[in-house]
Image (cartoon, rainbow, N blue to C red):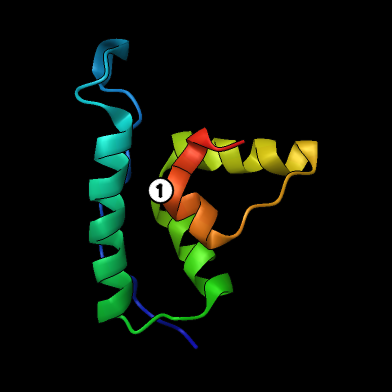
C-alpha cells in the first residue's frame, strides 16, 4: 500500500546553539498532541505502524535514542514513546 505521507515538523530536542527554547517535556507533549491528530486524520490505529510513523517523523535526535535502545536490548511500546519520548530508559 503506497501512501504519500504528509509533511510534519520533526521534534527538536535542543534549539540552535545548544540552548533549549522551552522545557523539552512540555514541547514533546505539544508535538505528540499534534502528531496524534495527524494519525487520527490518517486513520492509523495499528501500534506497529503508529510506532514506525513516530520514529519516521520524530527526527534524528529522537531516533538516535531508539537506536540506542536497540543496542542495549531495551524495548518500549508506542505508548511509552509517546508519554516519555527519549527520556524514559
Q: From the viewer's perspective, is 75 left or right of 29?
A: right
Say which quarter of the image contains residue 82: bottom left
Residue at the (45%, 64%) spot, across then down: 53
User: In terms of secondary structure, where does tag 1 sit?
Assistant: loop
Residue at the (25%, 58%) spot, across then down: 33
- Image quadrant holding the C terminus, namely top right
Residue at the (43%, 50%) spot, across then down: 83
Which residue is the extreme one toward the bottom?
1
Which residue is the extreme one toward the left?
21
The picture places residue 31, in percent across and down from the top left corner, at 26, 49
In the depicted structure, whether residue 36 falls above or below residue 12: below
In the depicted structure, whether residue 40 falls above or below residue 12: below
In the depicted structure, whether residue 55 falls above or below residue 53: above
The picture places residue 21, in percent across and down from the top left corner, at 19, 22
The picture places residue 48, in percent across and down from the top left corner, at 58, 72
Which sits in the foreground, 35 or 8? 35
Residue at the (39%, 54%) spot, across then down: 57
Q: From the viewer's perspective, is 68 left or right of 37?
A: right
Q: Residue under label 1, please give it.
A: 58
- Count of numbered labels shown in the rendering: 1
Which sits in the foreground, 81 or 62? 81
Q: Residues within 10 Å of mark 1 (few under 14, many from 20)?
A: many
Q: From the viewer's perspective, is 30 left or right of 2?
A: left
Q: From the viewer's perspective, is 33 left or right of 72?
A: left
Amino acid at each position: 500500500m503506497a501512501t504519500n505521507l504528509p509533511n510534519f515538523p520533526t521534534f527538536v530536542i535542543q534549539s540552535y546553539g545548544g540552548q533549549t527554547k522551552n522545557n523539552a517535556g512540555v514541547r514533546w507533549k505539544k508535538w505528540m498532541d499534534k502528531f496524534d491528530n495527524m494519525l487520527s486524520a490518517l486513520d492509523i490505529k495499528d501500534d506497529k505502524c503508529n510506532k514506525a510513523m513516530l520514529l519516521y517523523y520524530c527526527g534524528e535526535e529522537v531516533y538516535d535514542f531508539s537506536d540506542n535502545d536497540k543496542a542495549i536490548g531495551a524495548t518500549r511500546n508506542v505508548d511509552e514513546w509517546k508519554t516519555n519520548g527519549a527520556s524514559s530508559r
